[in-house]
Image (cartoon, coloured by chain):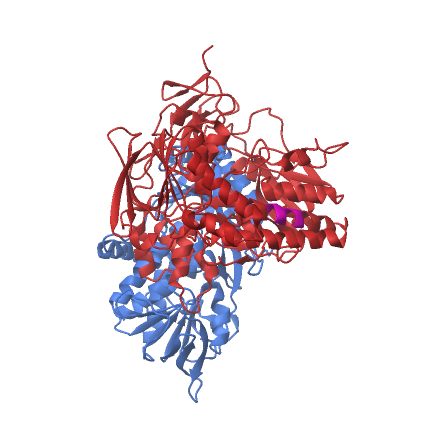
Chain colours: A blue, B red
Amino acid sequence: MEPGESSARVSRDPVVDVVVVGAGLVGACCARFLLAQGLTVAVVDTSGPVGGTTGSGEGNILLSDKEPGPELTLALRSRQLWDVLAAELTADSLPATPDIEFDAKGGLVVVADESELAALHAFADAQQAAGVLVERLGPAGILAAEPAVNPALAGGVRYSQDAQVLPMVAAAALLAAAARSGAHLIWPARVTGARHDGHGRITAVRTTGGDIATGTVVNACGPWAGEVATLLGGSLPVRPRRGHILVTEPLPHRFIRHKVYEGSYVAAVASDATALVGSAVVESTRAGTVLIGSTREFAGWSTRTSTAALGELARRAIALVPALAGVRAQRSYLGFRPASPDHLPLIGPDIEVAGLVHASGHEGAGIGLAPGTAELVTAIVTGVDGPVAAKAFAPARLSGVLV
Amino acid sequence: VNAPTFDFDGRPIPFAEGASVGASLWAAGVREFRRTRGAGTPRALFCAVGTCFDCLVDVDVEDRANRDAGTRPVRSCRTTATAGVRVRSSGSVARPATATPALSEPTAELASRVRDVEVAVVGAGPAGLAAAAAAAGAGAEVLLLDAAAAVGGQIHRRSTLVSAVTGTERSGAPAVEHLARIRVVLIEGDQQSGFRLHLDRAGDLPAPPNGQAPPDLVRARAVVLCSGATEVVAPFTGWTTPGVLTAGGMQALLKGDGVRAGGRVLVAGTGPLLLVVAAGLAAAGARVTLADESPAGVRELAGVGLASARHPATLVQAAGLAAGLARNRVQVLPGWRVSAVSRGADAADLHVRLHRRGTARELRVDAVGISHGLAPDVALAAQVGAELAPPDPGQWGRRVRVDLHAQTTVPGLFAAGELTGVAGAPAAHAEGVLAGLAAAASVSHASPAHALRHARRAVEYAEHGARMVSRLWPAPTAWWADLADAETLCRCEEVPAGSVRAAVAAGALAARAVKGRTRVGMGLCQGRVCGPLLGQVLQRQSLAGHGTAAAWLDSRPLAEPVDLARLASLG
């Protein structure tokens, strides 16, 4: 197959070392890291590149919302890798390919009153001890950093490492590069099952585009990873957690300079609520539009826009940046985050099926955590120790099976 | 007495009472309303009916304390000119006024202005008027909602139904309540819990501080959607040049604002609308050339009329249109299509290149009115979850699927007119009657069975006639192969055709994936202009195992841009 070419049919049954299922950013990163180890790779997707969660988010690469622990460790490693990836993708990019718009704009977490500020600063102290760069700001400090925010806010913390990327463009660039390195890109093709040997180990992936012989499958299907795990004979407890985003009309360049969000966002990320949880994240894009995220709710796979969610986003955004009251929203969109039961990613071997490795459960952090996840997956597949310990992310942690 | 004026970049612009800012600027010879943010190319009126956002101009906005005036880009074609107002060529970004800070736990101010009705009819064109009249005639309480100040719809602005609806032909109270200058931004709900229609004022100006407030929310037991269709223009070199308008836009300027688009006008493309527009402009004194790129088109129209013994009305209409062209000395160029338009030394002087098979010819005109048909406007129907059907051969865009009684796949939600498949005003009228009767019946105002049967037969008859005419002007498909890589496909975000080709070649098969990688359809119009074009391109890739639903950008969770302050009141 020519680089960049896609086909609904695999001309002859290919044999590869690893089949990556899912052409979102996590799958695209996995393909890149596996190829770098000299493995042969096929990427399979039901629709094409970035048809799912990667195309429905904001492109957050955040340290600010992570409490010290394994996820922050993975986030710090991922953040280092993003610097490398961004530089490589920019250097490699072909003429006429869009820019991935990697922007280390920094995050600004703000709170409304003194008691919240004390709690936020204590949280930042712990993050700082874990290696996160933080800058504590009072009311004057946040206004100087971000003139559009509500002057009545009590203060906040600036996280200079928080960054932003266009995830769809980044994933497409990674996949194009993977194709140039010899990866098979196979879509639209739906995984329908797997073949196993006498010991239950995977020997081939069955798809609507034909069978692909392989010993290893990486399940990078985001919120669909549970369904795909089942099709492959395994299991993964991933649920879709829905989110809405509002997009405004274009405003002046860098009208909002950071990713600005309410301190309550951290609590919302950690919550288990089924009902709607809102907390505003507001930021300008390079196109001038302001993205207003994000809600969290368990609403199945419903794609019906919730007016309650839009109302909540608009109210919180206006409270954060009052001038937005007179600005128009030009569109809204929604997507599904892959939620795990304990809010930690699910990265590692299936608890039963040998040869099946999962890379999902990132909830809203998948874009930021993708490179670290890919590095971890590659370490697991090649049987070496990576820079981040795998144990905390192993799906087996949830079933009481020791690893 | 001097005409009243408003100020545009320091220049006084006279206007006629009720005319839009855009039409007044056009009449005053302004051909550059703004420059684009990206390439810095000039833009002016294009669709002239509020679909595209080419005609943006900036107006001042002030906060509650009248400090720190910001500016807001508004569609000049949707903004009524008023004396003394200051308008500037648009920077195409909103500069919000600094609002008075308020920091309290955000809560929804529950919509206080709620109207409960039995049947809500959205859109007051031929289908909506017929539906409202039929539902009211069957005894239902009906509310008719429309963005325009007066009923009649976008193209066919006068109708005998207007008086029927407004009640002047009936004794007693008006049969239908009509809410003008209202748009529906969101519909939700179902038959069991009732439908909720979230409304906003039409137009782009911020809410007046103490203006009379229309209802925020309409709760209806049944809804008839008559949201019509959007004109489609298949791109060619120079199609973003000011002076190139949609043919329907020219008609709206002429009939709505009393402004002739130019003294020398080329009307081109495909479809019966071209004949109406050409005859109208010629009757208003313009020198009109009509280039019909369809192989059959104008030449066979009379033949179709003659061949359709079942459709004497079509014959009369065809003969009338042909006579109108002849009477007004419209030069007809059958089989010619526009391949390029460029600006002459004077901005109002356009050089047009036309092609027919191997041959080319040039033409110099003041304005080009172009149309390649209509695409159903299905956004509101999609919000409520109504199933959409892929386009029929020769048509643009998906349509709302309806059953034999005009009901969509959502019980209690009916649809009539162009959004169920473009078939023209007579079919829209017949479908409206059927939908109105059926909607009334769904809220327990049963009509006699023979009335429904009669309405059903009228729909079949009208749709048959429409198919005979539409066959003459199929949606063109060669435009995509002919379009240069550097030419714009998405007017809002200035996305060149080549970027879309590259994304498709790299495997982006779904419209959403192409959009995410190229920004096509991501601008203010939300794909209303380029969406049907991209959908046709992606659908023609027709990849095995790939659903056609992913090809389209026609589902907009917000039907139009809406103030965040308005969204903040949603519960």
Q: Decide: is B108 above or below A205.
A: above
Residue at 29% of width from left, 62% of height from top? A176
Residue ranking furthest to the bottom = A198
Q: Nearer the viewer, residue A271 or B268?
A: B268
One can see residue B316 in this view: yes
In the image, residue B186 lies at what x, y percent? Answer: 57, 45
Residue at 67% of width from left, 51% of height from top? B455
In the image, residue B232 lies at what x, y percent? Answer: 43, 46
Q: With B206 as the anchor, is A180 left or right in this view?
A: left
One can see residue A263 in this view: no
Q: Where, by quadrant of the figure, is residue B70 drawn?
A: top left
- Quadrant into which the C terminus of chain A falls: bottom left
Q: Decide: is A399 above or below A70.
A: below
In the image, residue B321 lies at what x, y percent? Answer: 48, 41
Residue ranking furthest to the top = B1
Main SS, magenta region, reads helix
- Quadrant into which the N terminus of chain A falls: bottom left
Q: Decide: is B68 above or below B41.
A: above
Residue range (magenta): B428-434
Q: Nearer the viewer, residue B218 or B113?
A: B218
